[in-house]
Amino acid sequence: MYTIHIDLGPAVVAVAMFILLSPGLLFQMPARTRVIEFGNMYTSAIAILIHAVLYFCIFTILVVTIGIHIHT
């Protein structure tokens, strides 16, 4: 009998980071008047770009370098 091993680590990390790194939810960088603002619930195109780069860097570090794995 064949068994299927599914690695849910990257999916769980991606969903959690998508929620936490949404621009304006916890913080926005750059903000309208300052470098960083917390919990303002506003966004801009440059903030989306910066948060996407942060998302990619942190996701790569967590999944590739550290190797977070959740096997089912």
Image (spheres, rainbow, N blue to C red):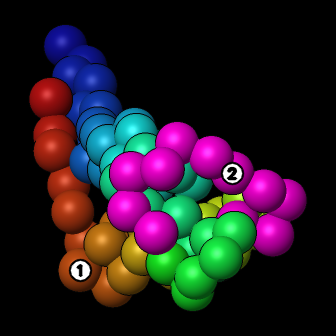
Earlier sequence position, callout 2 versus callout 1: 2
Quick one: label 2, few (<14), some, or many (20+) residues within 10 Å? some
Is residue 67 among what the camera can see?
yes
Q: Is residue 35 above or below residue 20?
A: below
Residue receiving disc 2 = 43
Identity of the residue furthest to the right in this view? 45
**What amino acid type is highlighted by mark number 2?**
Thr
Residue 41 image offset from top left, x and y in percent = 52, 42
Question: Which of the pair 25/67 is nearer the observer?
Answer: 25
- Is 44 covered by the magenta stretch? yes
Residue 66 image label: 1
Residues tagged 2 and 1 counted as in contact (Cβ below 8 A): no
Q: Mark 2 falls on what kind of element? A: loop
Of the residues shown, which amino acid type is indicated by label 1?
A: Ile
Q: Position of residue 58 (x, y in %)?
A: 42, 75
Q: Which residues are magenta?
A: 37-47
Q: Residue at x 69, y 69 (%)?
A: 32
Nearer-the-camera pick, 44 or 48 = 44
The answer to whether 29 appears left or right of 64 in the picture is: right
Q: In the current view of this chain or complex, which residue is farthest to the top? A: 1
Task: Please state which of residues 21 and 41 is positioned toward the viewer in this rendering.
Answer: 41
